[in-house]
Amino acid sequence: TVSRRLAPLGPPEVLFPGMQPLLADMSALPRLEEVAFDFLTDDVLAGLRALRAAGSPEEDDERLRPKKVILSGVKSLLEDPEIALATVLGKLGENLQEFALLVETEMEMRPFLSGFLHTRIGALPNVWQGRRALQALTLNWTAFDDDGVRSIAEHCPQLHTLLLDRSEYWTDVVADIIVEMLPQLRRFRMRSSAMLSDRCLYRLMEVARRFSMLEIEPSFSMSSYAMDQLKQRISPGVYDFDGGSSSILIPSRGSFFGFGGGSAAGTLAAIEAAADALDPYLDEGIQQAAGAGGMLRLLEPEQDVDVDPWGVLALPSRRPRLEIGR
C-alpha cells in the first residue's frame, strides 16, 4: 500500500495551519453528485470540520450534496477511523444514496494486525439519523456489534447493499435484524464471529430468495450442512463443482452462476467437468447468466474483496462526478 497524502496548507489559504480543504471545497459544487476520493487523512478531516454540520440552520451553503461518496485512506494517516466516519457523514446531505469508507493498512503492518480485534462500536443514532435515502453502505474498518447493526437498519430501511467487513462482535441476532428490518436488502456480507452459528444461517434461509449476492466467511460454529442448505435455497437447481481451491456455480437452464477465488488449473478443471455434465445447456446458461437465482459466495479469512467504486449503485449516466485518486 502506498501512503497517500495531499500536502496540507497553511494561512492565508486555509483558516488553520495544517488543513487540506480540497474535499471540503466540494461544497461549492452544488450539482456534483458522485465523488471518489482516495486521500482521506486527518488533514482533510480538519477541513471538513470547518463546515457546518448537516441539518443546522446555516448549513445550506456549506454541505456536500453528492448522492454517491466513495472514500479511502491509509490508517497511518487516520488517527481514528471511527471518528472519521462520524465526521464525514455529519457533513453530507440527506440525499446521500451510496456511501463507502475504506481504510487500508500498510503492507508491512498487516502481519502484526492479523486477528487483531477492532474497537467495539454500538448504536450510533446521531450518525445514521436522516439517512432514509441511503441504499448502499460499505465499511471495512468499523466493528459494529448487534446494537450497531440494528441502529443502521432502523435509520436506513431502504438499504439494498450492506457490506461490513468487521463482524467479530456479531451474534445470531444480526440475522433477525437483517430478515425483519431490511426487506429490500439484496447484497449482504457477513464475516466470521465466534458468536455466529447455524441458527444465523437457517434464519437467512427464510428469505434466501431475496439475495442476489450473499457473502459469508464461515464461522467456527457453522456446519457445512447448513451452508449447503443455504446455497440451495439461494440458487435452487444450480450445480456446484469443487475444482481444487476454486468453487464454481454453473447454471441449470439459465440460473445465475458465479466464480469464486482459486487457482486457474482448478477453475479450468471445474469448467470442463461442468461442460461434460450439463451440455447442451451450458453455453445457453452462461450467455443468459441473469436468471432468477442468486449466489452464495464463501470468503476466506482476511480475504480482501474487490470494490468497484461505481458498480454498487447504478445511477443514470452523465451525472456530474469527480474522481480523485488511483
Image: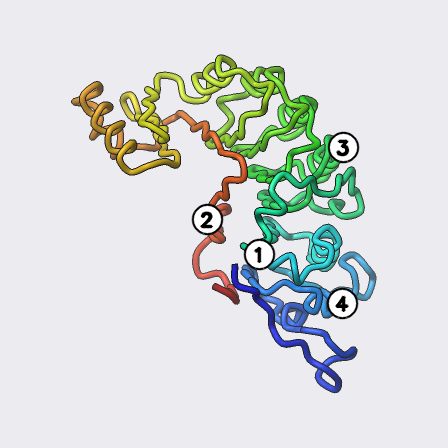
The dot on residue 16 is: none
Write down the residue under mark 4.
51
Sequence-earlier tag: 2 or 4: 4
Q: Please name the amino acid that badge 3 sits on.
A: Asp
Viewer can see residue 139: no
Sequence-earlier tag: 1 or 3: 1
Residue 232 location, x and y as percent?
43, 17
- SS state under label 4: loop
What residue is rendered at 78% in x and 56% in y? 55
What residue is rendered at 79% in x and 65% in y? 52
Q: Please name the amino acid that badge 1 sits on.
A: Glu
C-alpha separation, residue under disc 4 versus residue under disc 1: 30 Å
Viewer can see residue 234: yes
Sequence-earlier tag: 4 or 3: 4
Question: Closer to the observer: label 4 or label 1?
Answer: 1
Sequence-earlier tag: 2 or 1: 1
Question: Closer to the observer: label 4 or label 3?
Answer: 3
Q: Assess disc 4: are there few (<14), some (14-19) or many (≥20) residues with their C-alpha within 10 Å of its C-alpha.
A: some
Write down the residue under mark 2.
311
Write down the residue under mark 3.
147
Write down the residue under mark 1.
106
Question: Closer to the observer: label 3 or label 2?
Answer: 3
Q: Assess disc 3: are there few (<14), some (14-19) or many (≥20) residues with their C-alpha within 10 Å of its C-alpha.
A: some
